[in-house]
């Protein structure tokens, strides 16, 4: 993708549309964190995102489970995407706080669903939740968090 094509998408798509384009590979990831984590955006609509997450063995702690910091990281990404999906244009979010509840262990190589919902959109502060479920639909971890739009990207 050329810089002009990327700029055209950046300037014309809504937050949800740009996030969806990232998941389809039509817009480059803003960073390599998502690839490192094993996340893939499946659905993005205003106020709601769905991600699949397949953590690799490189995310495991010495006991063999996925490290809690990486679980928090996927929840943080999802909360931020949920907030960003509400915008007229995509603006990356900065996390103000993230409250995480770990409910079950996470295993490398398994695929999990992660759903983020923005409960309170806004220009200055957004509040979203995220839930990770396993293949059986059981809750694995959840988070709530507040974010603010990164003004370096605001239009």
Image (cartoon, grey):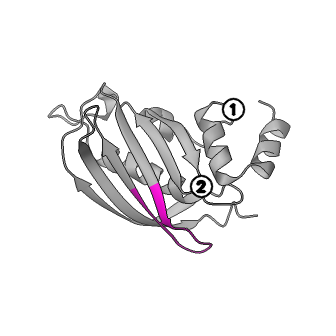
User: On screen, 57 above or below 27?
Assistant: above
Give the left or right position of residue 102, taking residue 85 as reference. left
Q: Position of residue 49 (x, y in %)?
A: 51, 47
Which residue occupies 43% across, 32% down? 38
The residue singled out by tag 2 in the image is: 46
Q: Position of residue 143 (x, y in %)?
A: 33, 58
Query: Judging from the image, what secondary structure is the residue with disc 2 in?
Result: loop
- The percent position of residue 35, horizontal first and vertical second, equals 49, 33
Which residue sits at x=68%, y=36%?
A: 27
Residue at left offset 65%, top offset 60%: 87
Pointer 2: residues within 10 angstroms few (<14), some, or many (20+)? many
Nearest-to-viewer mark from 1 and 2:
2
Determine which residue is flagged by label 1: 26
Task: Using the numbered discs, state the Cα–Cα distance from disc 1 to disc 2 in whole angstroms.
Answer: 19 Å
Where residue 102 appears, as percent x and y from the top left, is 22, 51
Instruction: Locate the N terminus and report the quarter of the image it occupies.
Output: top right
Segment colored magenta: 117-129
Q: Is residue 49 left or right of residue 136?
A: right
Question: Is 153 covered by the magenta stretch?
Answer: no
Can residue 29 be seen in this snapshot? no
Closest to the observer, 3 or 80: 80
Q: Residue at x 24, y 44 (%)?
A: 140
Depicted 96 relative to depicted 16: above or below: below
* Residue 29 figure quarter: top right
Helix, strand or loop: magenta stretch? strand
């Amino acid at each position: 993708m050329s810089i002009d094509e990327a700029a055209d998408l950046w300037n014309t798509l809504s937050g949800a549309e740009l996030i969806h384009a990232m998941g389809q590979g039509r817009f480059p990831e803003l960073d390599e964190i998502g690839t490192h984590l094993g996340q893939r955006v499946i659905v993005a609509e205003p106020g709601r995102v769905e991600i699949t997450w397949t953590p690799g063995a490189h995310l495991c702690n010495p006991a063999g489970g996925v490290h809690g910091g990486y679980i928090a990281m996927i929840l943080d990404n999802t909360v931020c995407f949920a907030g960003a999906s509400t915008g007229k244009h995509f603006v990356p979010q900065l996390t103000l706080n993230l409250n995480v509840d770990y409910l079950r262990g996470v295993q490398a190589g398994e695929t999990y669903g992660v759903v983020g919902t923005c409960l309170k959109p806004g220009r200055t502060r957004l509040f979203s939740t995220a839930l990770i479920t396993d293949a059986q639909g059981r809750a694995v971890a959840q988070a709530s968090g507040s974010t603010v739009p990164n003004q370096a990207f605001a239009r």
